[in-house]
Amino acid sequence: MSRFLAQKIAQYMLVIFITITINFFLPRLMPGNPLIFLAGEDVAFLTEAEKASILENYGLDKPLGEQYTIYLKNIVTGDFGYSYQKKMPIADIIKDRLPWTLLLTGSALLLSSLLGVIFGAAAAWRRGTKTDAALLIKFMFFNSMPSFWVGMILVALFGATLRWFPIFGAQKAWMPLSGWPYYADILHHLVLPLTTLVLISIPSTFMIMRYSMLNVLGEDYILMAKAKGLRENAIKYRYAVRNALLPVVTIFMLQLGYMFSGATVIETVFAYPGLGRLMFEAVVGRDYPVLQASFLIITVTVVLGNLLADLLYPLVDPKVRR
Amino acid sequence: MSLLQVKGLTTSFHTKEGTVKAVEKVSFSLEKGEMLGLIGESGCGKSTLGLSLLRLIEEPGEIAAGEVTINGVDVIKLNPEAMRKVRWNTISLIPQSAMSALNPTAPIGKQILEAIELHKPRIKRDDAVKKVKELLEWVGIDGGRWLHYPHEFSGGMKQRVAIAMALACDPEIVISDESTTGLDVLTQAQVIHLIKRLQKELGLSIIVISHDLAMVTAICDRIAVMYAGHLVEIGPTRKILDNPLHPYTQGLLASNICLDSSGTCSSIPGSVPRLIDAPPGCHFHPRCERGKDICKASLPPLKSLAAADHQVACFAYKEGF
Ligand SMILES: Nc1ncnc2c1ncn2[C@@H]1O[C@H](COP(=O)(O)OP(=O)(O)OP(=O)(O)O)[C@@H](O)[C@H]1O
Ligand SMILES: [Mg+2]
């Protein structure tokens, strides 16, 4: 077991290392003045001394190899540079933003997987019936809707018209709360963006689960379970759902990546102060260092998520257990 | 009264192209402690017949007519809950593909255990586990491995696990559907030996479904021959071998003799008809040398000739034919 663990972790560390390296070289391969890249269009208003200090700050006057070592060292120590637009160290900005994105994507991932599995299993169990067809059509519908559009419909309906939920931000910034009211407020703000993200993420899990379960239901061990006289629920859960879950876990890993791209759009629609919104702001403001750091953080998070799913996979599939 | 009595059993599959009567008007009986061989070409409805006895036919199939009387109770008429209790308790199955008949995500022992605990709710966990281990030992598998998963066993071992599983609730009837296909000759022999032991030591009644004529004739007391959904001949093994009556049985036996390297190898010309919306008569008549007009028009009933225990469904034995 421990050897398996060490092997997996080593594999993923290698992936992270490669990501970090690409993240280092990519901007350096781009044409143009690195100053524009670092400081944005404000560069026109900078004095020569300021320009030199930025370059020195980033060690851009040093040879590439040395830059790379410095870059690695900085990342390990959590130093992502400075945002000249927000006038803050990037690490601090990310520290503010990352928890919101993790909250949004994490809960959306869990919720959409859970609901996708439940609905997928229900549809497959009642294959060919009206329930099956209705579920299929609904999820196909959400699958084909652009996420910002779903978000805007929810904003218009539950935010603007019914006024049930706030449509802006992650908490009431002007009213310091603590204890339960604080969490309730956060939850209240989370409802609409979370619902949007869940709605657009369920379909893929639903499809995979439904298809996987249909396959499993045709297996001989299901027939044997019936022959043994097992009750319907035992057959459904202990046999069918249990086995149909295997491919879904793999999809769970892939979903993580989509989740972040979905979150970028949704955080923008709902002005949710996460990493996705930060990237949007960075693109609009040409704040490349922030963008670069966000990419890195997201990639590393996705890779770590995959590692987690990979480590959990043996729990569902005895074949790969050690 | 026989342990199992099947009367006029008809099982159809309603496919898009039409209705397939995979089993049509089949009647036979099975005595206590008897081993009955069920033979016939691929697709003639053997597995369907076996599953029908357990009422395991699913959409788009249905048991369209007939009675399956076990210990005097027609199980076709039972409600689903009562039928659920008959399964495994009275009649169990060693499936055609035992390799894939085990749940890959549960330990083999647990799969046997669940059947025991389901049908004997009052049994103590320890006793049930003990029984599981005994069953595994009985089929030659180390009882200590009861918590191992299916993929940790070889194909032949899985087959034996399936046999142990079939015995979990001390059933009276076991249906063994081609339990030896896909195994090497030695493992086949082991499994067959085990099935024979079931009958001898446990006094079970067994229906052995197989293509392997040599095996069936070696171990079965009686043989039933199926052709395209119909039971065409049934009788004691000796009588079927020495004096096959139905033209199909004769052809089947003749085509098997070539395995004995006697030099003459015959086969039945033609092939099994597609059963979709099949005509009412004897399905064998297009391949039959003795076919007459009456064979096209109506289904010959299963009838005894010289001996009461040897029955055949063929108009050739009708007077004035
Ligand atoms: N689920 C189903 N849907 C439609 N037709 C079916 C279904 N199951 C079986 N059949 C049809 O019923 C007929 C009998 O099939 P069955 O499996 O009983 O044959 P078999 O004698 O067991 O063959 P084999 O020796 O190859 O196992 C075949 O023509 C088959 O096409
Ligand atoms: Mg079969």
Image (spheres, coloured by chain):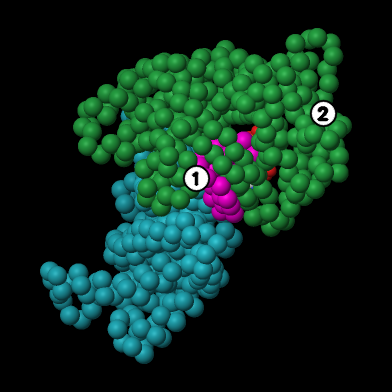
Q: Mark 2 belongs to which amino acid? A: Ile
Q: In the rendered view, does A32 fall on the left or right side of A51? A: right
Specify which label sits upstream in the sequence, 1 or 2: 1
Q: Within the image, what quadrant is residue B260 found in?
A: top right
Query: What is the chain identity of the residue bearing mark 2?
Result: B
**What is the quadrant of the C terminus of chain B in the image?**
top right
The front one of A81 and B150 is B150
Identify which residue is drawn at 82% across, 38% down.
B285
In the picture of the structure, the residue carrying the numbered disc 2 is: B268
The front one of A172 and A160 is A160
Highlighted range, magenta: B42-68
The x, y position of residue B296, in whole percent, is 82, 45
Hue used for the chain lettered A: cyan
Q: Does the stretch in magenta take in B205?
A: no
User: Can residue B308 be spotted in the picture?
Assistant: yes
Identify which residue is drawn at 33% across, 54% down.
A79
What is the spatial separation of the Cα atoms under label 1 and label 2, in whole angstroms?
33 Å
Q: Callout 1: few (<14), some (14-19), or many (20+) C-alpha neighbours within 10 Å?
A: many
Secondary structure beneath label 1:
loop
The front one of B313 and A85 is B313
In the picture of the structure, the residue carrying the numbered disc 1 is: B55
